[in-house]
Image (spheres, rainbow, N blue to C red):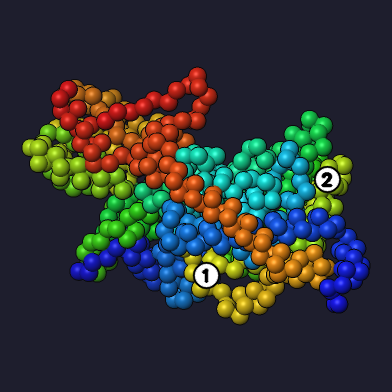
Amino acid sequence: MPANTKSAGKTALAETGLSEQTLMGLYTNLLKTRLLDERFRKLFRQGRFAGTYFSAVGQEATTVGPTYGLRDDDIIAPSHREIGANVTKGVPIEIIAAQVYARGNSPDKGKSHPCHYGWRPKGVITPASTVAGQTIIGTGCAMAFRIQKKDNVVVAFFGEGSTARGGWHEALNYAGIYKLPIVYVCQNNLWAESVPATLAAGITDFADRAKAYGFPGVTIDGNDIVTVHKTAADAIAKARSGGGPTLIECKTYRWYGHSEIDPADYRAQEELEAWKKKDPVLRAEKLLTDLGLLTTEKREAMVEQISAEIDAAIDSVDKAPYSAPEEAYNDVYSAQFPVRRDEY
Amino acid sequence: MKKVTYIEAITQALDEEMARDERVFLIGEDIGLYGGVFKATKGLMDKYGAERVIDSPISEVYIAGGSVGAAMVGMKPVPEIQFADFITPSMDQIIQQMAKLRYRTAGQWTCPVTMRVCCGADVGGGLYHSQINEQWFVSQPGLIVVMPATPYDAKGLLKAAIRGEDPVIYFEHKRLYRWIKEEIPEDDFTVPIGKAAVRKKGNDITIVSYGLMYHRAAEAVTALEKDGISAELIDMRTLLPWDRETIFESVKKTSRAVLVQESSKTGGVMGEVGAAIAEEIFDYLDAPVTRVCGIDVPAVPFAPPMEHFFLPNADKISRAVKKVLEY
Ligand SMILES: Cc1ncc(C[n+]2csc(CCOP(=O)(O)OP(=O)(O)O)c2C)c(N)n1
């Protein structure tokens, strides 16, 4: 494509069907997610925080695309690998970092797990670790929006492996019956821990499952931010206007282990290399460059600015204390039912 | 005799029982190609094939319910629950089917399933990777619940469970996997289900525990010895049906009891043991039966200071013992 002339850029821009602002917004979130995710991986390997870290490098488009453009009062129901959805929904990096570091200023005060991000001001449901759990809860939120006659929507995220759970099927069945305002985003990254997608289901396109529940399912290229965003935005608009749920399956890939303590030696190096060539961030970068929206200088300036933001956040959580141990007693019940404290 | 870790003892038991009895098969998440997230089943798929070491989808309902079905037609399933925290979807199958099958069919069908459940805190696992929820199961007659504390018991109890005719929930503590090493016989052996072990004789007080907390209690016993206190230490090993004779006999002798469990106090195993002591041998007691437990909150919090605050330890146990002795 003769990309660098302005007029050629304009034509191609129209082809994407997205505005310049949207494309740049998507790219900024992709870049932010990638840089933050890579930073956390490094920090974990340096022993700077406890537990483990679930990287989503390689599959950023599947979380950024559906989340971009949501309202603050829309709900997202993420799982353990949805840092991109949190970033895009507008959860501040300091909050995300405090969660990862389990510090006292984390939204959960350090009670849950590093990758169980959740923050009420931006409508992010804190996930429970029982996978697909948040999909079921998210469906409940959509049911309430229907009862409340609100036009809010829910976007629920999960991996292909999680779709094997009975509760997942019960939720989608219910959503289909009542045409709830929810969009289900399946991130098919081909692996559920060490179990390949071929052993997670007897079908290859997980979107086919929607048929059983009476709403549409689509399988798309999850590494193409334009496709992911447009497909999701259409589904969200439809859900918002009473048209019912959609199941979107994004074919994608996670570059690293299930978490940072997994060397992922169960999969072939060639498979990884092939997918690295389909890097969703580089792909967006190329598109934007071709459209004349991005230059090397501009990108570098963005990286610098985001990195500074990340540095500041990490610096502040490094200094932030853990909650006092007695915090463990708080938030069991509402204040009128104090918890018995044992002294030994 | 060779020194083996707790997890090696588990792998050996599975391997030997699979070799011994072709009805034995394994099913669970990541147990085959990967050898299990903690490597308890490492090498077994290579040895016994994908039909006897089955990589399951994320289907805890099926892992439990499918095992019940297979057991009904002559197999000996040994399903694995990767983290005790994720056993909840299986509860319907465990409580309504597994535990009640013999009873509701008047013995026409039985359910020899040995469900391995990886549990426990003190590993920095976070709120959903640290739970120990044996208390949910000990309230369900029809189930057998065991929790070994040593490699010898880990192997012997697992073999006994697999060879038995009843459903067993076999809790293994992830903190013990590589921490505890012990010499165990190379010849075949089992550890009887339903029998506690008196690990150390003593006269002043009885300390009862199991699992990881057995080791914390043992640390306390050593510390108390230095203060001239002679504690008798009991490892329950089987939590349902539990060994009343051994525990009662000891408490009759010492007249005092401190009961230690990792899970929250309310509704726990030690509530049952304590109530039984009070109900049946009250006359022998010189002081109230006292429990040292995880604190009464919904789960083990993640941040390290809170996780340690949650758990019993040797100091807490020693202080409780001294308080009871001063009563
Ligand atoms: C009910 C339940 N069972 C098992 C686990 C352990 N576990 C955590 S993540 C995971 C794999 C999830 O795979 P998938 O849904 O494909 O998501 P991905 O990790 O690939 O993003 C498993 C088995 C869990 N968290 N919850």
Do callouts 1 and 2 mark residues in contact (Cβ within 8 Å)? no
Task: Using the image, determine if residue B72 lies above or below residue A105.
Answer: below
Report the disc number at residue A239: 2
Numbered badge on residue A264 = 1
Give the left or right position of residue A36, taking residue B296 as reference. right
Q: Is residue A255 left or right of residue B47?
A: right
Q: Is residue B174 visible?
A: yes
Give residue A219's quadrant in the image. bottom right
In this rendering, position of residue A230 left or right of residue B181: right
Residue at 80% across, 64% down: A293
Quadrant into which the C terminus of chain A falls: top left
The amino acid at mark 1 is Ala
- Mark 2 residue's CB less than 8 Å from ligand 1: no
Position of residue A105 measured from the top left corner of the image (x, y, whole percent) = 50, 39
- Taking the view exactly as shown, the residue that stands out farthest to the left is B228
Task: Tell me if mark 1 has few (under 14), some (14-19) or many (20+) residues whose alpha carbon lies within 10 angstroms of its own.
Answer: some
- Spatial CA distance of label 1 from label 2 is 38 Å
